[in-house]
Image (cartoon, grey):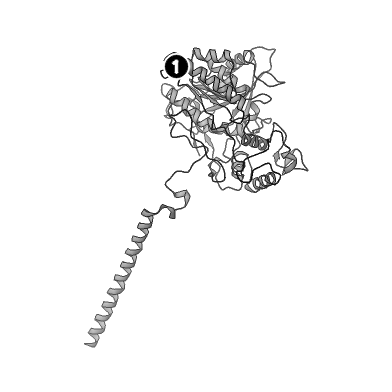
Amino acid sequence: MKFQSNHLLKRENLFILISSSWISLWFSSLVFTVLRLGDYDIETPTHHPIQTNSRDNYYSSRSGPTPQKQIVGDDHDNAAIAIEIPGVELQIPPPNLNQPKIQIILPDYDHATLTTSSTISQPKTSYKPKNKGWILLLHACTHSALKFFSPSPNCPDCVGLSEELRIVRLVMEMGYIPIAISCADETRRCWAPPRDIPRIEYALNHPLLLSGLSFHGDDGGDAGRDFDGDGGGGKNEKRGGGGERPERIFSIGASSGGALAAELVTKQISQAAIVMVMSLSDPVVKQMRKSPKPTYFAPMPRDKGTLQRVQRNVEALRRHGDENGGKGTAKSCYILDNESCDSLPLTPNYLVQRVPQMTREAAMTLTTKLKEVGHIDPGSNMLIVDPTKSNWRNIISPSNSTHWLDQFALKPGYSPLAKALHRAWAFHEYCSEVVVPALHFFEDWYNISKNYSNTYD
């Protein structure tokens, strides 16, 4: 009996132990489930179901005339780190032998890799080029096509200014081929439409350019021929690749280049234009009325004079649409974005995301020094002294007038760092923030497939 009682006691204890374990496990699971369902804040921000804002996110709502305001600053994610995009220089013989050769810079797809700051762990990725069409990049006065791409063996004179590089990257990521062109004026480097437009038209049909665009995709074939985005050619098989001019050509320009971008639309060379920080003359507006095409105006609010003139341009163009019924053509094809190109906070994150090879430590040093001398407001992180006129170079690099930290160029017109400060100040500068919403607007207008963005390896 004693043996039997001990045996029963052991069995009862074992049962209690097992039951307790199951109850504990069940209770733990219940608590975990309640926490998961009841409070998302226990998750880290990167796993939160609400999508984070990014300066490069494609705008999901594009029905209104004004795009969503993009968020910048220290809370910005690391998806927009500055990259180097090497160029390939072409020198096309001009139609008039008394003129200089036509300088064109294309992306070097064989060496176009995503290069990130050394402080952020992110793998390098290479482009798989696709082609919805071409985008002509038109420089401002005193500049050239060399400013849009980084130096490379195929373009040793390329400069790669920060805002221009960012425009190129956004264009490529959306599936277009960027083509930067220089004007004929080698002194002032400003565009003269009567002389430059025939040169551009000539260059866009030149065999040297078309052969230069016969790059090879990951399948060993001509990636540019896959215009439909279905991977298999089809009826548009020959559009946009090496050998033929594409159906769609858009133009992007700032200042003098912005005015030319609009004129290329009036000449039917380009089917749409982004006009940055530039108003248009009355004759150009009159020509645009004759054949309305989608045009995206992007002035900078700080430049009040240009902003007011652009507003008058758009009012005149839209008024013409009202007079003619405004049924989805003249009235609706002009967008005035007077918010996206506003001033930006000059934070360490901003510099890392704009200036190739910028580190967080260097960016912290720069912003701290400029705050100490009163160039940056310590509360808002906004510039309060115009960097295009100030002595900020002497402040951060008193012993070296050409390079800061022996790495970052300081020479005016050749400094990606200076360009980033100019964009943050935002008076008369390129504005990459409008590229994505403008291209989406053009795609909506022409019903171009959205499922055509470039992919990466």
Identify whether 192 is placed above or below 149.
above
Q: Of 79 and 293, which appears nearest the observer?
A: 293
Q: Is residue 278 visible?
A: yes
Quadrant where the N terminus lies?
bottom left
Q: Of 199 and 315, which appears nearest the observer?
A: 315
Q: Residue at x 51, y 36 (%)?
A: 69
Q: Residue at x 44, y 23 (%)?
A: 445
Disc 1: CA contacts within 10 A as few (<14), some (14-19) or many (>=20): some
In the image: residue 456, left or right of residue 187: left
Locate residue 402, reporting x and y percent.
75, 38
Locate residue 135, reporting x and y percent.
54, 25
Locate residue 43, reporting x and y percent.
44, 53
In the image: residue 98, left or right of residue 128: right
Residue 313 sits in which quadrant?
top right
Residue type indicated by callout 1: Asp
Please tell me how many numbered marks the rendered image carries. Answer: 1
Q: Is residue 171 visible?
A: no
**Which residue is disc 1 drawn over?**
322
What is the residue that sits farthest to the bottom in this orientation? Answer: 2
Q: Of 93 and 198, which appears nearest the observer?
A: 198
Identify whether 80 is placed above or below 266.
below
Q: Of 266 and 120, which appears nearest the observer?
A: 266
